[in-house]
Image: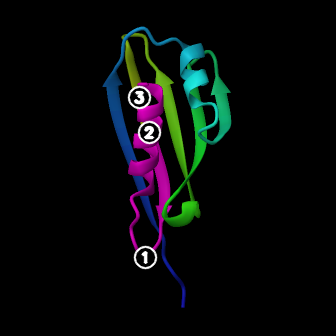
Amino acid sequence: IRQNRLRSAIHKIYMIRDMSFVKLRDSLIGMGQILEEDFEKQVYVIAIRSGTANMNTAVVAIQLMDDNTVSFLGYAKEGLIKQRGSVKSQARCGRQVFQ
């Protein structure tokens, strides 16, 4: 029996004040594994453990934009039972960034 996995992606944009790329990095350290760091485009890509017992990995791309906005794009593979890994991991990143 072959199990098809559904792909789940979510994109959100938030307004934030007084955020620098260094502050963004400092808030993401310890959340997961930073996969990519692009200083020119001001983007971080981070892998975060999510799902039941943290068995799945969600990937979240966070971009600091020029007009005081932060863009979050989360992606996770879902099995037969949807655990909303991309939504939950993106929310965890958001809470950490906005603290």
Task: Return the x and y of residue 25 as percentages of the image width and height.
Answer: 60, 23
Q: Is residue 14 left or right of residue 35?
A: left
Mark 1 sits on what residue?
80
Task: Return the x and y of residue 68 as percentages of the image width and height.
Answer: 37, 12
**Amino acid type of disc 3?**
Ser
Q: Secondary structure at mark 3?
A: strand
**Amino acid type of disc 1?**
Leu
Q: Tell me which residue sits at (54%, 91%) in the image.
A: 1
Task: Return the x and y of residue 6 as percentages of the image width and height.
Answer: 43, 67
Query: Mark 1 and mark 2: span between their CA atoms?
Result: 22 Å
Mark 2 sits on what residue?
73
Mark 3 sits on what residue?
71
Taking 56 as reference, is 37 above or below it? above
**In the image, which disc is placed on residue 11?**
none
Query: Mark 2 and mark 3: span between their CA atoms?
Result: 7 Å
The residue stretch that appears in magenta:
74-99
Q: Tell me which residue sits at (46%, 27%) in the image.
A: 97
Toward which corner of the image does residue 98 lie, by quadrant?
A: top left
